[in-house]
Image: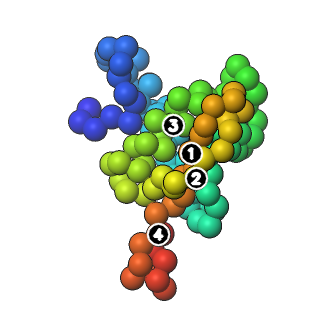
Amino acid sequence: MSELNYHNTNNLRGDGLKQADKRATKQTDWIKAFFQRNPTHNMTPSAVLRAYNKAYQLTPPNGILLTSVRRAISDLAKNNGVLEKLDLTTRSPRGGREGYWCLRLRVGEQGGLGL
């Protein structure tokens, strides 16, 4: 496995690592598609988490973790350049600050807005 979506901080190996990476890839792909379906929306990780859990009809403790959403968003911003962080923040559901993210629009593709 060359490029992992799963950040293997707990040193998984073999089938365990393959399954974890498969889940992380599914999450990342869904989050990318979600931003692409909503190209004019600025969203926080918490908003993306709620949308993901609603789409898959998941409720705590069965939904994905907020850290998984943040991992996917960060990966999509750093590695793929698909998302970008805005200079806007809001209060998170747990009382801290949370930043907004948006789809990075590329000028010159698909009628001026390359998605």
Where residue 49 appears, as percent x and y from the top left, is 65, 38
Give whichever of discs 2 and 4 has the lower sequence position: 2
Tag 3, which secondary structure?
A: helix
Vertical relation: 44 (above or below) 103: above
Tag 2, which secondary structure?
A: strand
Give whichever of discs 1 and 2 has the lower sequence position: 2
Q: Residues within 10 Å of mark 4 (few under 14, many from 20)?
A: some
Q: Quadrant of the N terminus?
A: top left
Please name the amino acid that badge 3 sits on.
Arg
Residue that numbered label 2 is attached to: 88
Mark 2 or mark 4: which is in front?
Answer: 2
Residue that numbered label 1 is attached to: 99
Residue that numbered label 4 is attached to: 105
Please name the amino acid that badge 4 sits on.
Leu
Tag 1, which secondary structure?
A: strand
For residue 106, side relative to residue 93 (left or right) = left
What residue appears at the point 43 percent right and 42 percent down from the top-left corner?
Answer: 74
Q: Quadrant of residue 21?
A: top left
Please name the amino acid that badge 2 sits on.
Leu
Asked if labels 3 and 2 touch by Cβ distance under 8 angstroms, the answer is no
Q: Is residue 56 visible?
A: no
Mark 4 or mark 1: which is in front?
Answer: 1
Q: CA distance from mark 1 to mark 2?
A: 6 Å
Camera-nearest residue between 75 and 43? 43
Please name the amino acid that badge 1 sits on.
Gly
Tag 4, which secondary structure?
A: loop
Asked if labels 1 and 3 touch by Cβ distance under 8 angstroms, the answer is no
Give whichever of discs 3 and 4 has the lower sequence position: 3
Question: Which dot marks residue 70?
Answer: 3
Q: Residues within 10 Å of mark 3 (few under 14, many from 20)?
A: some
Camera-nearest residue between 37 and 15? 37
What residue appears at the point 51 percent right and 55 percent down from the top-left corner?
Answer: 86
